[in-house]
Image (tube, grey):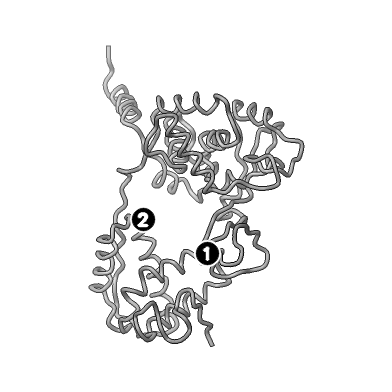
């Protein structure tokens, strides 16, 4: 007997978000989500729950499985796009649907019509990358009257670390002698759906809808050792606290929430006169300028915690026109012998 999760599938009395009685498709989705319960990370489970509740069930939950074909999935994709969702979010929703479809194919042969899932094309037109001039201006601002928050921004700008990894970094994971940073934890705020042992959380008291989770990085590759440039090593030496178990961004036994770090970054950017900069912009900037500086792609991929250089290229590397021009000139010089 598959257990119900009221956070996704209604109140346990047969209702589902005002949509009426639960259908067979609801049950299939419920079973699929339950099959993931012990196989995925807490944050991934929460993401699946949210996608099902917000998108999949409202559109497909009332459809008989046999009637869901290519036309219905294309209409689903168009509706998601018309709702203003980004191509990445639309793809995330369709990936969840594809997993559900594969579950139904496996557990209930013949119940679904044949259909294709076409993912939207993602572009990097809206990706913000700091120019070299902007990056120098930001560095000058951050190193003036530097505090823990500014140091966290510097850390991301010089290593490409994610915001959750920066917030979860402890001094015991930093070696100034070897000039390395061991990324072995991350922290993130997620919606509360279920409680489990072995998960360190904060901000999730009685009546709370979200909590902050401190856990291992998102993947095996994300658990990594990053070499530090000398300038960053020098800053670490200046800020080292007496307690090696303290968090880098606070100097205490309490970590800084990613949301608090985001608020600080917003203030820093306003004071620095930079617009459209989010924490992930720092990671994009680090990756792009690393490639432009000639950093070997496999090395960069490992520093960022990716499973392959192809992911690094497709997600984060957006070369500037200046860099493209320099490479075109290299080709020209190789082909044409200039006097």
The picture places residue 42, in percent across and down from the top left corner, at: 56, 64
- Classify 182 as above or below 320: below
What secondary structure is marked by label 1?
Answer: loop
User: Foreground: 45 or 239?
Assistant: 239
Q: Which circle's residue, 2 or 1, is located before the other in the chain?
A: 2
The picture places residue 227, in percent across and down from the top left corner, at: 61, 35
The picture places residue 138, in percent across and down from the top left corner, at: 46, 28
In this rendering, the label closer to the viewer, 2 or 1: 1
Q: Which residue is drawn at 44% across and 25% down?
A: 137
Quarter that holds the N terminus: bottom right
User: Foreground: 186 or 228?
Assistant: 186
- Classify 328 as above or below 101: above
Tell which residue pokes out farthest to the front in this image.
207
Residue, disc 1:
209
- Classify 159 as above or below 260: above
Give left or right: position of 154 versus 319: right
Report if the CB atoms under discs 2 and 1 are less than 8 Å apart: no
Dot 1, crowdedness within 10 Å: few (<14), some or many (≥20)?
A: few
- Classify 1 as above or below 148: below
Residue, disc 2:
88
Dot 2, crowdedness within 10 Å: few (<14), some or many (≥20)?
A: some
What secondary structure is marked by label 2?
Answer: helix
Tell which residue pokes out farthest to the right in this image.
242
């Amino acid at each position: 007997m598959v257990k119900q999760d009221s956070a996704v599938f209604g109140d346990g009395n047969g209702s589902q978000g005002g949509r009426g009685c639960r259908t067979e498709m609801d049950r299939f989705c419920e079973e699929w989500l339950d099959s993931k319960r012990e196989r995925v990370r807490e944050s991934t489970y929460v993401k699946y729950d949210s996608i099902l509740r917000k998108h999949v069930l409202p559109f497909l939950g009332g459809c008989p499985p046999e009637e869901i074909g290519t036309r219905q999935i294309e209409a689903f994709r168009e509706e998601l796009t018309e709702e203003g969702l980004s191509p990445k979010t639309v793809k995330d929703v369709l990936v969840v649907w594809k997993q559900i479809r594969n579950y139904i194919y496996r557990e209930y042969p013949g119940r679904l019509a044949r259909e294709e899932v076409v993912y939207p094309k993602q572009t990097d037109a809206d990706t913000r990358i700091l120019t070299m001039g902007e990056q120098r201006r930001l560095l000058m601002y951050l190193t003036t009257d530097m505090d823990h928050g500014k140091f966290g921004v510097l850390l991301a700008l010089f290593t490409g670390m994610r915001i959750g990894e920066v917030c979860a970094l402890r001094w015991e994971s930093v070696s100034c002698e070897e000039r390395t940073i061991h990324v072995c934890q991350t922290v993130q705020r997620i919606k509360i759906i279920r409680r489990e042992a072995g998960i360190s959380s904060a901000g999730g008291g009685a009546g709370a809808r979200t909590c902050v989770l401190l856990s291992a990085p998102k993947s095996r590759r994300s658990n990594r050792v990053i070499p530090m440039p000398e300038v960053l090593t020098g800053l670490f030496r200046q800020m080292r606290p007496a307690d090696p178990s303290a968090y880098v961004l606070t100097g205490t036994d309490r970590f800084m929430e990613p949301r608090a770090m985001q608020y600080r970054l917003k203030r820093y950017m306003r004071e620095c006169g930079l617009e459209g900069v989010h924490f992930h912009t720092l990671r994009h900037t680090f990756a792009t300028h690393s490639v432009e500086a000639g950093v070997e792609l496999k090395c960069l991929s490992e520093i960022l915690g990716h499973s392959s250089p192809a992911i690094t290229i497709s997600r984060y590397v957006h070369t500037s026109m200046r860099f493209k021009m320099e490479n075109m000139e290299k080709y020209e010089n190789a082909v044409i012998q200039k006097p």
